[in-house]
Amino acid sequence: MRKLFIILMLGVLFVFPTFASAQSDVTLTSVDVQLWPEYDQPSMLVIVDFLIDPSTPLPVDLTFRIPKDANLIAVAVQTSDGGFLNADFTGPDGSGDWQSFTLPITQNAHYRFEYYQALTFNGNQRSYSFVWGGDYAADAFKVSVLEPSDTTSLSVEPAHRSIEQVSGLKYYDGEVVRLEKGEQYTLNLRYAKTSDTLLNPPQGIQPLAPVDENTPGRVSLNNSLPYIIGGLGVVMIAGGVLYYLQAGRGSSHRSRRRKHLQITSDADDETGAYCPQCGTRSRPGDRFCRTCGARLRVQAE
């Protein structure tokens, strides 16, 4: 049993260094870096596309470093139709001046990651430094720079002499170089602009077609106006009828009350008595004459 355990441990010791070495010795066939300053944000958009050597045993985990102040926004793998799908990754985790993320490579495909990084502003002048960490060797490494809008001057170090027009946009292409593992690449960019205009400013939600009174689900005031006037007319008529009924009921009640008072008054007059001294008519309940004070004769009920 002890011998079996020792054999297993020796096997792990032999296999694990080989596995770790395989991951660190991965060569990238191509690395294409695009720098898009002030594209859709007032910062630098960095797009990194890469392919691994087809002879690399898969699967394999690749760990990339990006600047500590960078904001990683996408990690994707290209599909057969040329589109991109989100790829699984872990991180990023910070360490010193860098942060790193790990991407499992499961197929020989085109991979991409993107991040934003701050520019340095000084009036109309902008500057930026790009650094490639050199985590893996690259057979063909290239950096291109997209010229921002309203640019009056632009300089790149190392020099980018090739200029390419794509869909009305100007790109400065650098030379293709080979990088060894651990070899860093640094690019310094400076340019001046006359405005803060972005190349592709973010747009709010826009309707697919112009919105007017014929748009489904939209209520037009012109179409609804006759119904509104008709409804107000019905309300006014109903209010008038209700007022008339209330007024008539109140008048009838007052008439009945006046008639009742009149009848009561007449009845009181009929049941009243006369003073035997002065002849003044008394009121019901009187015991003495209101005029001369003589005692009244109370009639038996």
Image (tube, rainbow, N blue to C red):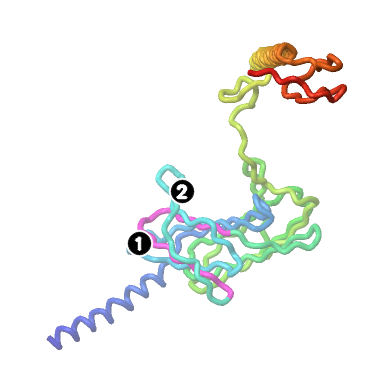
Q: Quadrant of the C terminus?
A: top right
Q: Position of residue 182 (x, y in %)?
A: 51, 74
The residue depicted at 60 percent of the width and 25 percent of the height is 218
Identify which residue, 184 or 99, lies in the foreground: 99
Identify which residue, 144 or 43, lies in the foreground: 43
Identify which residue, 260 or 111, lies in the foreground: 260
Q: Which type of secondary structure does the marked residue at label 2 adopt? A: strand
Residue stretch rendered in magenta on the structure: 97-115
According to the image, label 2 marks what residue? Answer: 84
Q: CA distance from mark 2 to mark 1?
A: 23 Å
* Residue 265 position by quadrant: top right
Q: Is residue 230 visible?
A: no
* Residue 27 placement, left or right of 57: right
Q: Position of residue 183 (x, y in %)?
A: 54, 72
Q: Reply yes or no: does residue 98 show up in magenta.
A: yes
According to the image, label 1 marks what residue? Answer: 55
- The answer to whether residue 248 is above or below residue 202 is above
* Residue 218 placement, left or right of 13: right
Identify which residue, 79 or 137, lies in the foreground: 79
Q: Identify which amino acid the numbered label 2 is placed on.
A: Phe
N-terminal label among 2 and 1? 1
